Amino acid sequence: MEKIDFKRHKDVLAYFNKNYVKTEIFPRQIGRKIVLASKVREDSDYDEEYEPSFETTFLQI
């Protein structure tokens, strides 16, 4: 098994989408949910006034 090392979350997401979503190991819906969750996490980490809506929060499930 190859060792993979990433410096940025963005690179992990790209690798996951390329190797697992595009090859249909995971459905596209999962890939979209992971990307949305990453965006919500980034927004909440770096924007002091960010407050996710109920809909955004519900979509995380």
Image (cartoon, rainbow, N blue to C red):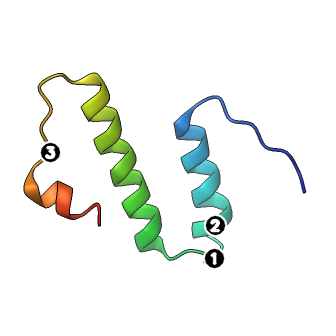
Amino acid type at image mark 3: Pro
Task: Answer few, some or many: residues within 10 Å of disc 2's Cα (few below 14, many 20 plus, some between 14 and 19).
Answer: some
**First in sequence: mark 2 vs mark 3:** 2
**First in sequence: mark 2 vs mark 1:** 2
Label 3: which secondary element: loop
- Compared to residue 46, the image places residue 18 above or below, namely below
Task: Answer few, some or many: residues within 10 Å of disc 1's Cα (few below 14, many 20 plus, some between 14 and 19).
Answer: few
- Residue shown at 28%/43% (left/top)? 40
- Compared to residue 57, the image places residue 4 above or below, namely above
Q: Label 2 vs label 1: CA separation?
A: 5 Å
Asked whether the beta carbons under mark 2 and mark 1 sit within 8 Å of each other, the answer is yes
- Compared to residue 5, the image places residue 24 above or below, namely below
- Residue shown at 17%/22% (left/top)? 48
- Residue shown at 33%/39% (left/top)? 41
Amino acid type at image mark 1: Ile
Q: Label 2 vs label 3: CA separation?
A: 28 Å
Name the residue beneath numbered marker 3. Answer: 52
